[in-house]
Amino acid sequence: MKKILVLSLVSMVAISLSSKDIGKYDFDYEISPDIIKNISVSVPAPDYSTISSKSSQNTVDHFKYMPIFKKARYEYEYESTNFTGKKKVIVEFKGYSEKDALASASITYFNKKDAKTIDYSIKITEKGILATDSILGNERIEIPIPLFKDKRWTENGNESRVIGFSSKIQTPYSNFDNALKILTNVSNSEAGKIERYYAENIGLVKEVIKIEDKTDILTLVNYTEIK
């Protein structure tokens, strides 16, 4: 009964404030402390139905597909429509700095007569695991954070999407049944696309780049953890 009385008083004041007779009311009226003490206020429970299906319960450990904490050596074979035969590429993860959230690495490209080495880094950012240089391209997000199926992002005009985690890939090193696949549609190219495959606890095992009349293929030949 007391709750109804208070609500009635509040409603009357609200109605009068919206009318032209506001000056007629005495604002010195005081509600009894005993009445206020008995007013119950309830806060509605949060609506969990609005939480995306891609929330943390469906995310995948991004480091599983890019173990930058390990020291490791990757050997790839590189094929391209720009040249005949196959070239060798060596990638080395040299160490990880927890302070800087940064792993140092190098890429060595072998030709018939010489070799060229490029030092680069892999860092953890809010958007993902970022490589300041990629084997067949430039800086890019290798693995997005958070990582989940159908995750999409745009980078340098290119649109990328996580296709899934069950791709089957054959390489000279091993056959993989549950590889992460990332598809990138290349800007300024109607049919240009990049397909990347990452194996659990190893990293990049295959990459196929098709842009107009050119095709580049990178395939893992050997992988060694360095103690």
Image (cartoon, rainbow, N blue to C red):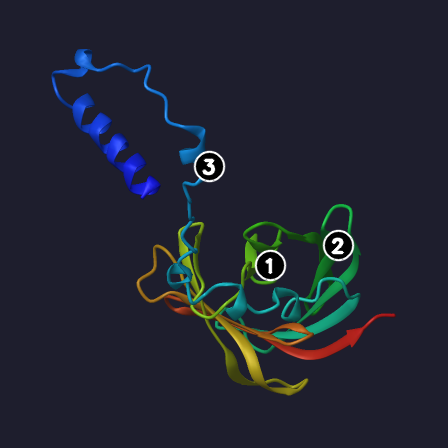
In the image, residue 217 above or below residue 96? below
Residue found at x 28% / y 41%: 4
Quick check: 27 left or right of 157?
left
Going by the numbered disc 2, the residue's amino acid type is Ser
Of badges 2 and 1, nearer the viewer stands 2
Using the rendered view, name the quadrant where residue 94 is placed. bottom right
In the image, residue 37 above or below residue 68? above
Q: Earlier in the sequence, mark 3 or mark 2?
A: 3
Q: Tell me the SS state at disc 1.
A: loop
Query: Residue pushed farthest left?
Result: 20
Q: Tell me the SS state at disc 2.
A: strand
| Cβ atoms under marks 3 and 2 closer than 8 Å | no
Q: Earlier in the sequence, mark 1 or mark 3?
A: 3
Q: Depth check: 209 or 11 in front? A: 11
One can see residue 31 in this view: yes
For disc 2, the marked residue is 104
Q: CA distance from mark 3 to mark 2?
A: 64 Å
Query: Residue pushed farthest right?
Result: 227
Residue found at x 63% / y 70%: 65
Going by the numbered disc 1, the residue's amino acid type is Ser
Q: Earlier in the sequence, mark 2 or mark 1?
A: 2
Using the rendered view, name the quadrant where residue 84 is placed. bottom right
Give x and y (percent) for residue 169. 55, 84
Query: Residue pushed farthest top?
Result: 23
Q: Looking at the rendered structure, which numbered label has been put on residue 134?
A: 1
For disc 3, the marked residue is 37
Residue found at x 38% / y 59%: 50
Going by the numbered disc 3, the residue's amino acid type is Lys
